Amino acid sequence: FSLYGFKQLLDKKAVSVVQYDTNRVGGITAAHKINALCEAYSVPVIPHAGQMHNYHLTMSTLASPMAEYFPIFDVEVGNELFWYIFDGEPIADNGFLQLRDDVPGLGLTLKTEYLDQFDIIE
């Protein structure tokens, strides 16, 4: 779960592909550092889970040959919470994703249509 843990794995040649969880390694900055380390070791990185932050990480490094992608589906368990609270997630077309460069930040906006279904605690 850290840059140093991944360095140990890479030094020992214990992994042939790295698939970290951005939310568990310390966020986008830490994940970017892991990408750079893996690129130096010529080990591919495929961040776990789709989601916009991982697509940006994937497209910002030569270490990532592809992104994990989960199509939007209507279920009540799993990663669909992301789809209930954000708009802007790209939809794959023929196996490819296109990120927009005409929107700020990660390209997401906050959805309000489902707010009544959540308990918001301040």
Image (spheres, rainbow, N blue to C red):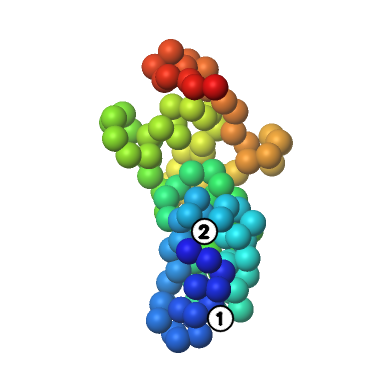
> What residue lies at 71% left-to-right and 36% top-to-bottom?
104
- The residue at which mark 1 appears reads as 41
Name the amino acid, label 1: Tyr
How many numbered circles are shown?
A: 2
Vertical order, 60 against 92 (above or below): below
Vertical order, 110 against 34 (above or below): above
Name the amino acid, label 2: Val
Where residue 40 sits in the image (x, y, percent)?
61, 78
> What residue lies at 56% left-to-right and 81% top-to-bottom?
41
**Cβ–Cβ below 8 Å for labels 2 and 1?**
no
Q: CA distance from mark 2 to mark 1?
A: 19 Å
> What residue lies at 51% left-to-right and 46% top-to-bottom?
97
Q: Which mark is residue 25?
A: 2
> What residue lies at 33% left-to-right and 33% top-to-bottom?
73
Q: Considering the numbered disc 2 on the image, is that residue within a helix, a strand or a loop?
A: helix
Residue 110: quadrant of the picture = top right
Tell me if residue 59 can be seen. no
Label 2 crowding class (10 Å Cα cut-off): few <14, some 14-19, many 20+?
Answer: some
Sequence order check, earlier mark of 2 and 1: 2
Where residue 32 sits in the image (x, y, percent)?
62, 61
Camera-nearest label, 2 or 1 = 2
- Taking the image as shown, residue 119 lies to the left or right of residue 55, namely left
- Taking the image as shown, residue 30 lies to the left or right of residue 92, namely right
Where residue 45 sits in the image (x, y, percent)?
49, 66
Q: Looking at the picture, tell me which residue is in the foreground, 93 or 31.
A: 31
Vertical order, 113 against 76 (above or below): above
